[in-house]
Amino acid sequence: MNQTKGPVFTSHYPALKRRANSSSAASMILLLFVGLFSCKPAKQPSSATSRMHTAIDSIMPQRLKVELVQANGHILSFWGNGDVQDTTHIPVGISSLLRPYGANYDTAYNILRVPKGETYAVALSDGTSIYLDAGTCIKFPLVFHGSKREIFLVEGQIYCKVTTDHEHPFVVRTSKDEVVAPGNAFNVSLTGGQSVISSMAAMCTIIDDKGRPTRLSPGQQAVRPPGGKPFVKTSFSPVKTLSWLRGSRLFTNATLAEVCSTIDRVYNLPVITDSLDLHKKGFNGILDKSVHLDSVLTNLCDIGGMRWYIDQDQQLHFSKGEN
């Protein structure tokens, strides 16, 4: 638990009190499910809203650029796409940004880093489209050679729309596992300390670091918890899993730690929780980046019986709300 220095700016609106009866609990669950904490706050004086906007804007970090590190060490930087809205078309292939650096430059691996707060999308040489979430890093060649089309997911989350080629399967490698698909649309996430692979349109195979295969049909996902345990297959909701492509994040019974981690990734803004008791709370709803962050925080605090504030070091905190 981090020591606090007291608030400089705080969301001073009292948290909603919880009632013990079952009917109010049911209504709360219903409200949460439709994404209460992404909505705008209840009526507030415009001056108060303006002050909260200003307070949050004052601590927001500057935008960071996407970095492309070529195999020869040359670094290119450029702005991200903002929110990925169109998964049917990518206007510019990454190859247009690369500079030749020798006879074998096309087989060497390049590194693409997308910082927190940004997203990016690239078209690879075979026509495969890769969508990169905030805080994601991949390694890829300019041109695929050999029997496999292979890229590496170093960290973060990607969505792949793979051009079908049964003779040259597409492979996404992580530090422990690999996903193999001749052609498919699938999502690979390394966030939250676990591996999650979700298959959208066709069969794919996951092979873990112990050589154990897991085959996924369309509509199935495989989750591998930390600790080297085998993958477990489940069904999943594409709307929830792919919500990040539309600039929003859907939560179902998520912990506050998960919500804070997502805020950090989406806004590049770390959040400190002042009490470990807050981590026990569960949240359902939508984090929509088109909504100003102070509105998200205020409604999140109303739901969780908390308050948010900014300390003297310009750090954002969640603390227990007033009773």
Image (cartoon, grey):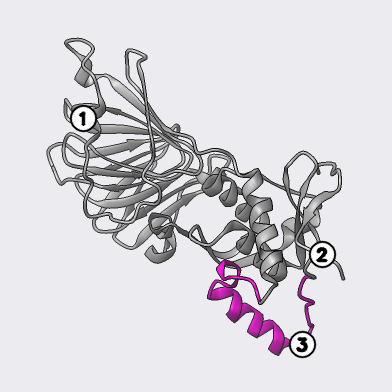
Q: Which marked residue is nearer to the observer: mark 1 or mark 3?
A: 1
The magenta segment is 15-42
For the image, the number of numbered tags is: 3
Q: Is residue 217 visible?
A: yes
Which of the 4 quarters of the picture holds residue 218?
bottom left
What residue is shown with label 2? 321
Is label 1 in a helix, a strand or a loop? helix
Q: Is residue 28 above or below residue 206?
A: below
| Image mark for residue 21 | 3
Q: Is 105 in front, or is 270?
A: 270
Separation of marks 2 and 3 at Cα, in angstroms: 21 Å
Question: At label 1, which amino acid type do we have?
Answer: Ser
Q: Magenta includes 168?
A: no
Q: Which numbered disc, 2 or 3, marks the residue closer to the eye?
A: 2
Identify the image quadrant of residue 284: bottom right
- Residue occupying image coordinates x 32% and y 16%: 71
**Disc 1 to disc 3, C-alpha distance:** 61 Å
- Which residue occupies 64% across, 57% down? 53
- Mark with earlier residue (1, 3): 3
Identify the residue position indicated by label 1 in the image: 96
Asked if marks 2 and 1 touch (Cβ < 8 Å), the reply is no
